[in-house]
Image (tube, rainbow, N blue to C red):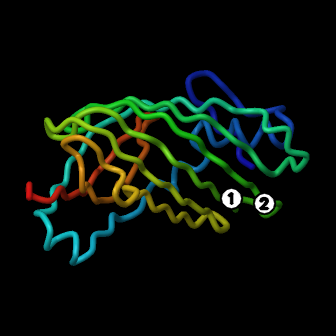
Amino acid sequence: MKNPKMRGRSCAGAGLLAGLVCWLSLGGLASLYETSPHSTQAQEKKAMTTRVNGEFEVKLTPQDDKSEDPLFGRMLIDKQFHGPLEAVSKGQMLAARTAVKDSAGYVAIEKVNGTLAGRAGTFALQHSGTMTRGVPSLTVTVVPDSGTGQLTGLTGSMTIRIEGGKHFYEFEYAIPAAQ
């Protein structure tokens, strides 16, 4: 496992579970965030697809889940989105690291609360990421039928990238026209 450094922090000297949590929180899975959004023909028929970009801050807080398996980790997620998506989110992440260098995986669910292009409401995002010997794969999608308020019916997917320690999102989404 690499010992990434960010904002003066280091993962060096951490135990296996603490090292995994530190590695994840300092961007160890950052390359997982380099994926393409997906949309379906059904989504496109319901509403015009829109693509927006912005920046966000994320705080991952390791949780002691009392697991006896040091390869697993659990974290709380706190995010603040800026740009066309002005929102906060809270969620949870489960992660596993393997004995093979640069192989790991995580799943997460987060509830986003705020405005998207001026429409207020909430929705949930589902993450599924893997790293297979350094080759990343990440899918972040809106949980079906999770939109509320003016975001009811929201569908879409998000890509995330990290550059220079900053987090950026690209959100491709559709909201059906009012019935």
**Residue 104 — which label?**
1
Is 79 left, or right, of 49 in this rendering?
A: right
- Determine whether label 2 and label 1 are within 8 Å by CB: yes
Query: Residue 18's quadrant in the figure?
Result: top right
The numbered dot on residue 29 is: none
Query: What residue is rendered at 43% in x and 36% in y?
Result: 164
Label 1: which secondary element: strand
Q: Position of residue 171 (x, y in %)?
A: 28, 52
Q: Is residue 155 left or right of residue 179?
A: right
- Where is 64 relative to 93, above or below? above
* Rendering coords of residue 174 (x, y %): 19, 58
In the image as oriented, which residue stretches furthest toward the top? Answer: 8
Residue farthest toward the front in the current orientation of the protein: 179
Q: What element carries label 2?
A: loop
The number of numbered badges drawn on the structure is: 2
- Considering only order in the chain, which callout, 1 or 2, is on the residue closer to the N terminus? 2
Q: What residue type is labelled 1?
A: Ala
Q: Which residue lies furthest to the bottom in this view?
A: 41
Kindly identify the residue that appears in the image at 24 percent across and 50 percent down: 152
Corner quadrant of residue 81: top left
Instruction: Please name whichever residue, 89 or 60, is drawn nearer the observer in this view of the structure.
Output: 89
**Residue nearer the viewer, 96 or 19:** 96
Tell me the CA gap for discs 2 and 1: 6 Å
Residue at 81 percent of width and 51 percent of height: 71
Classify mark 2: residues with Cα within 10 Å, few (<14), some (14-19) or many (20+).
Answer: some
* Residue drawn at the location 65% of the way across and 24% of the way down: 9
Q: Where is residue 179 in the image (x, y as percent from the top left)?
A: 8, 59
According to the picture, the residue beneath numbered tag 2 turns out to be: 98
Q: Position of residue 52 (x, y in %)?
A: 20, 48
